[in-house]
Amino acid sequence: MQVFSGTAILYIFTRNWTIMVIMITGASRGIGASLAQAMTAAGHTVLMVSRNRSRLEKVMEQCNKSAGSTLAHSIPFDLNDLADLEQEFVSRVKGISGTLDVLVNNAGQLISKPFKDTKVGEARALFDANFFAPALLTRICLPLMEQSELKHVVNITSMAGFQGAAKFSGLSYYSASKAALGSLTECLAEELKEEGFKVNALAIGSVQTEMLAQAFPGLKAPLEPAQMAEYMRWFVLEGCRYFNGKVLPVSLSTP
Ligand SMILES: NC(=O)c1ccc[n+]([C@@H]2O[C@H](COP(=O)([O-])OP(=O)(O)OC[C@H]3O[C@@H](n4cnc5c(N)ncnc54)[C@H](OP(=O)(O)O)[C@@H]3O)[C@@H](O)[C@H]2O)c1
C-alpha cells in the first residue's frame, strides 16, 4: 500500500483543487467547445470566446449544467476586429474576471484553395484570425495574468505548419499562418521568461471537426474533439511545469 506524508497529501489536495481562470477562444464548437467542457467539468472557470453568440451560449449552458455551477461565461466577439480588442474586448473580460491564469489561443480559420487563386485580402484575413488576433490577444491578456501561479499561454497550431511534416495543396496560407504562430510562440517564451510567463504551442494533427471536414471532405480523423481536449486539459494546466517555448506535435495522423 502506498503511504503518503501529510505534506504530500496537502500538495496533491491543493494542486487538484486550485480553481483556474482560463480563456479559450473558438469555444463555440469543435476542439475549443470540448476543452471548455473538460475544464468546467474539472471545476475551473472558463471565459469562452467566439463570434456565433447562439452556439457559444448553447455550449456555455451545457458546461454549466454538467458542472452544476456557473463556471462558463461567454464573450461573443469577432477576434478579427483587431481594433476593438484593446478597448471593448478587455472591458468585457474585466466585467467577468479581473485575473486570468491561462490563455488558450484556439480559434482558427482555414482557406482550402489553390495558392494562385487566393486573393491577398483573403490571405490577410486568414492571418488576422490565425496570427495577429492570437498575438494581440496575448499582449492584452498578459497584465491580467501577472498575479497567476501559471501564466501559461497555449497556442493551437497545426501539423500543417510544423516544419518537416507533410504538406497539402490548397493549404499554403493556412499552413504559413500556423507556422508563424509557432515561431511567435518560441520568441515570446524567450522575451517573457523573466516575468514568469510560459508560452507553448500544440501542433495538432487530425481531429474530427467542421474545419477538418472543410479541408479534407470525407476523411475520418482518428480523434474526436473530446479526446484531443482530454490531453489539452492536462497540458494547459500542467505543461507549463515541463515546457516553455516549445511547439509540440500532438498527432496520430496528418491529415
Ligand atoms: N481539426 C483539426 O484536424 C485541426 C488540425 C490542426 C489544427 N487545428 C486547429 O485547432 C483549432 C480548433 O480547430 P477546430 O477543428 O475545432 O475548428 P472549428 O470547428 O472550425 O472551430 C473553430 C472555432 O474558432 C472560432 N472562430 C473562428 N474565427 C473566429 C474569429 N474571428 N473570432 C472568434 N472566434 C473565431 C469558431 O467560432 P465562431 O464561428 O462562432 O466564431 C469556432 O469556435 C484551430 O486553430 C485549428 O486551426 C485543427
Image: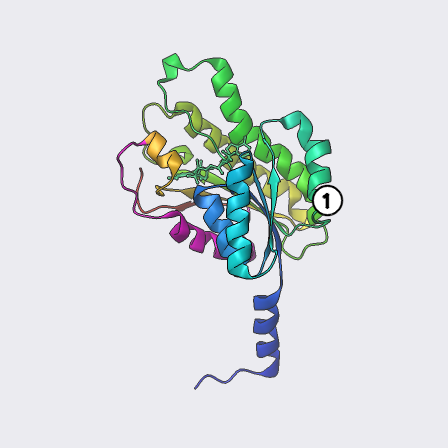
Q: Position of residue 89 (x, y in %)?
A: 68, 35
Above or below for 115 versus 109: above
- Visible residue check, residue 31: yes
Q: Is mark 1 within 8 Å of ligand 1?
A: no
Q: Please state which of residues 148 and 35 is positioned toward the viewer in this rendering.
A: 35
Q: Quadrant of the N terminus?
A: bottom left
Q: Position of residue 195 (x, y in %)?
A: 70, 48
Above or below for 131 versus 25: above
Q: Residue at x 27, y 37 (%)?
A: 219
Where is mark 1, residue-wise?
Answer: 94
Q: Quadrant of residue 187?
A: top right
**Residue interval drawn in magenta:** 216-245
Q: Quadrant of residue 164?
A: top left
In the visual, does 140 lie left or right of 225? right
Q: Quadrant of the C terminus?
A: top left
Q: Position of residue 192 (x, y in %)?
A: 65, 43
In the visual, does 123 lie left or right of 49? left
Element at badge 1?
helix
- Visible residue check, residue 164: no
Amino acid type assigned to the residue bearing label 1 in the image: Lys
Q: Residue at x 41, y 43 (%)?
A: 204
Q: Please state which of residues 134 and 199 is positioned toward the viewer in this rendering.
A: 134
Q: Please state which of residues 199 and 122 is positioned toward the viewer in this rendering.
A: 122
Magenta span contains residue 215: no
Above or below for 251 versus 175: below
Q: Coloured how?
A: rainbow
Residues packed near mark 1 inside 10 Å, few (<14), some (14 to 19) or many (20 plus): few
Q: Residue at x 56, y 58 (%)?
A: 241
Q: Position of residue 168 (x, y in %)?
A: 32, 28
Magenta span contains residue 230: yes
In the visual, does 239 lie left or right of 6? left
